[in-house]
């Protein structure tokens, strides 16, 4: 299985050049069965990474462009009256895919943003008194632009908390961007194909649940979240949902690195992606922010936890 995950990382890296760490974090999020938020400036590769993840793991993919006039029905679907049958028939919206890209999610109105909450948490959609189950597996990858750009609505804390992890891609380094320019000039497009079957992907997800976490690991996680609750300087202390997310992401990170047990370094690797977007205020601009996570890691010694 490790060869499969390594091949998947290499395949995505051929398209999203110079971002192996972020690719590993995104893969970790999907293996942990969580939703991913990608925050960055336009044109940094957020959509490319999302589509590459879907292709690599053989997932059905749909992209929803969030705009100020997007309505919940445009995303969820709606019941349309069939005059021949004299009854209403449900027409599913683009959210009925295994991987849904909610592109520029913070450009939609709060009403439309909130329509995602039930789908992300319950993996179902309720419409006109009927419940419609979403496909399995089901992931939402949201992309978000900086708050200082025009036409954006801050995501509320309750919705930010629904995303298991949040990453930023950042600018590519000199060599990576030069490679992109070279491939663009020669029109040498990388052809992608599934790196594993959907059954193998689901088996990997199940394997995450069997990664061992010792009592010392539990204590380290509890020490981190408790510090955020008891000390000043953390606008939104970490909730029990956040501590569960930290454990699950740490297990998935360990599996990506071919281990069946969690070490403190796994927690330290995923903490900024799991905790930073939960602890900051909703109106904070995210560009380059890792200060709260760094403060937590510096405050707690894993050996003393």
Image (cartoon, rainbow, N blue to C red):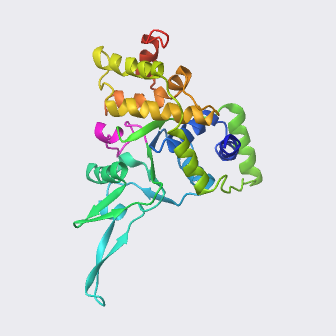
Residue at 55% across, 51% down: 202
| Residue 93 can be seen, yes or no | yes
Residue 170 higher or lower than 8, as above or below:
above
Q: Give above or below for 162 relative to 128.
A: above
For the point 65% across and 56% down, which residue is it? 194
Instruction: Say whether residue 157 is magenta.
Output: yes
Looking at this rendering, what residue extends furthest in the top direction?
304
Query: Which residue in the rendered view is the most extreme toward the bottom?
Result: 84
Image quadrant holding the C terminus, namely top left
Decide whether the magenta segment is chiefly helix, strand or loop: loop
Vertical relation: 59 (above or below) 246: below
Q: 71 or 31, which lies in front?
A: 31
Q: Quadrant of residue 70?
A: bottom left
Q: Residue furthest left?
A: 129
* Percent of width and height locating residue 195: 67, 52
Q: Dividing the image into 4 quarters, which one contains the N terminus?
A: top right
Q: Is residue 31 left or right of residue 64?
A: right
The boundaries of the magenta stretch are 145-160
Instruction: Provide residue 121's location: percent of width, then percent of height.
Output: 34, 48
Q: Is residue 287 visible?
A: no
Q: How many marks do you count on the picture?
A: 0
Looking at the image, residue 303 sits to the left or right of residue 259; the answer is: left
8, 150: nearer the viewer: 8
Report the residue at 32% width, 30% height from top.
240
Location of residue 33 in the rendering, given as x and y in whole percent from the top left corner: 47, 45
> In the rendered view, does 73 fall on the left or right side of 11?
left
Q: Position of residue 35 (x, y in %)?
A: 44, 45
């Amino acid at each position: 299985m490790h060869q499969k995950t390594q091949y998947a990382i290499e395949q995505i890296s051929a398209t999203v050049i110079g971002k192996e760490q972020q690719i590993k974090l995104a893969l970790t999020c999907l293996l942990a069965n969580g939703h991913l938020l990608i925050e960055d400036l336009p044109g940094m590769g957020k959509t490319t990474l999302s589509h590459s993840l879907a292709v690599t793991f053989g997932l059905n993919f749909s992209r929803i462009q969030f705009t100020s006039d997007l309505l919940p029905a445009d995303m969820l679907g709606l019941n349309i009256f069939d005059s021949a049958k004299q009854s209403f028939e449900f027409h599913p919206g683009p959210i009925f895919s295994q991987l849904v890209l909610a592109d520029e999610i913070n450009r939609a109105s709060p009403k439309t943003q909130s329509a995602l909450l039930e789908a992300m948490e319950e993996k179902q959609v309720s419409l006109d008194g009927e419940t419609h189950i979403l496909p399995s597996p089901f992931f939402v990858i949201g992309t978000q632009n900086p708050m200082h750009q025009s036409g954006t609505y801050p995501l509320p804390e309750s919705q930010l908390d629904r995303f298991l992890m949040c990453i930023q891609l950042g600018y590519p380094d000199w060599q990576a961007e030069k490679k992109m320019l070279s491939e663009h000039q020669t029109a040498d497009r990388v052809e992608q194909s599934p790196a594993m079957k959907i059954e193998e992907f689901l088996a990997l997800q199940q394997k995450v649940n069997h990664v061992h976490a010792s009592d010392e690991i539990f204590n380290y996680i509890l020490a981190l979240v408790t510090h955020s609750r008891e000390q000043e300087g953390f606008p939104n202390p970490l909730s029990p949902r956040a501590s569960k997310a930290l454990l699950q992401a740490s297990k998935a990170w360990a599996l990506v690195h071919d281990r069946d047990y969690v070490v403190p370094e796994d927690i330290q690797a995923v903490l900024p992606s799991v905790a930073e977007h939960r602890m900051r205020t909703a109106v904070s601009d995210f560009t380059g922010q890792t200060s709260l996570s760094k403060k937590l890691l510096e405050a707690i010694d894993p050996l003393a936890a």
